[in-house]
Image (cartoon, rainbow, N blue to C red):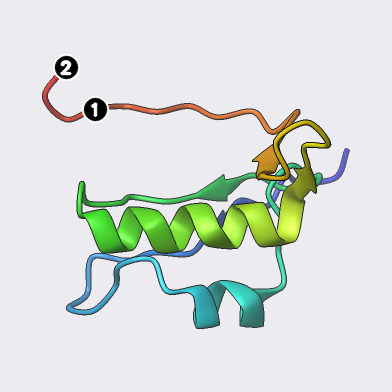
């Protein structure tokens, strides 16, 4: 049985927030075979960068609205205030 590899694109280091350049260098794709782990602050610019990256690498164009949307990518979201 092959080991499952989970890619982490964030860290607890200063400046370890999501960074699109780092995500592009790692070469992983949301919705592909390997899971991606992200710990992300509720910060507007970081969340917008994450959304833009996911839409760019795994998104499709919705023919009705012309917007980029992402389908069939499993997501587990845990809110620290839950």
Residue 51 or 82: which is nearer the viewer? Answer: 51
What percent of the width, then of the height, locates residue 22?
Answer: 52, 80
Badge 2 marks a residue whose secondary structure is loop
The answer to which quarter of the image holds residue 24 is bottom right
- Residue at left 55%, top 29%? 75
Confirm or deny contact between disc 1 and disc 2 (CB under 8 A).
yes
Q: Quadrant of the C terminus?
A: top left
Q: Is residue 60 above or below residue 48?
A: above
Q: Is residue 69 above or below residue 37?
A: above
- Residue at left 22%, top 51%? 41
What percent of the width, then of the height, locates residue 13?
Answer: 22, 74
Q: Is residue 67 above or below residue 18?
A: above
Q: Which mark is residue 4?
A: none
* Circle 2 crowding by C-alpha within 10 Å: few under 14, some 14–19, many from 20: few
Q: Quadrant of the N terminus?
A: top right
Residue lying at the far left in this picture: please name it.
81
What percent of the width, then of the height, locates residue 33?
Answer: 81, 44
- Residue at left 23%, top 79%? 15
Residue 68 or 47: which is nearer the viewer? Answer: 68
Q: Which residue is mark 1?
A: 79
Residue lying at the far top in this picture: please name it.
82
What percent of the width, then of the height, locates residue 61?
Answer: 79, 45
Q: Is residue 37 above or below residue 56?
A: above
* Circle 1 crowding by C-alpha within 10 Å: few under 14, some 14–19, many from 20: few
Badge 1 marks a residue whose secondary structure is loop
Q: Which residue is mark 2?
A: 82
- Residue at left 53%, top 59%? 52
Q: How many labels were placed on the picture?
A: 2
Residue 41 or 51: which is nearer the viewer? Answer: 51
The answer to which quarter of the image holds residue 78 is top left
């Amino acid at each position: 049985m092959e080991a499952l590899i989970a890619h982490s694109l964030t860290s607890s280091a200063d400046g370890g927030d999501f960074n699109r350049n780092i995500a592009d260098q790692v070469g992983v794709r949301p919705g592909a075979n390997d899971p991606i782990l992200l710990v992300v602050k509720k910060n507007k610019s970081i969340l917008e960068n994450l959304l833009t990256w996911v839409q760019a690498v795994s998104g499709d164009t919705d023919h009705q609205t012309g917007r980029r949307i992402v389908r069939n990518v499993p997501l587990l979201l845990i809110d620290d205030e839950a």
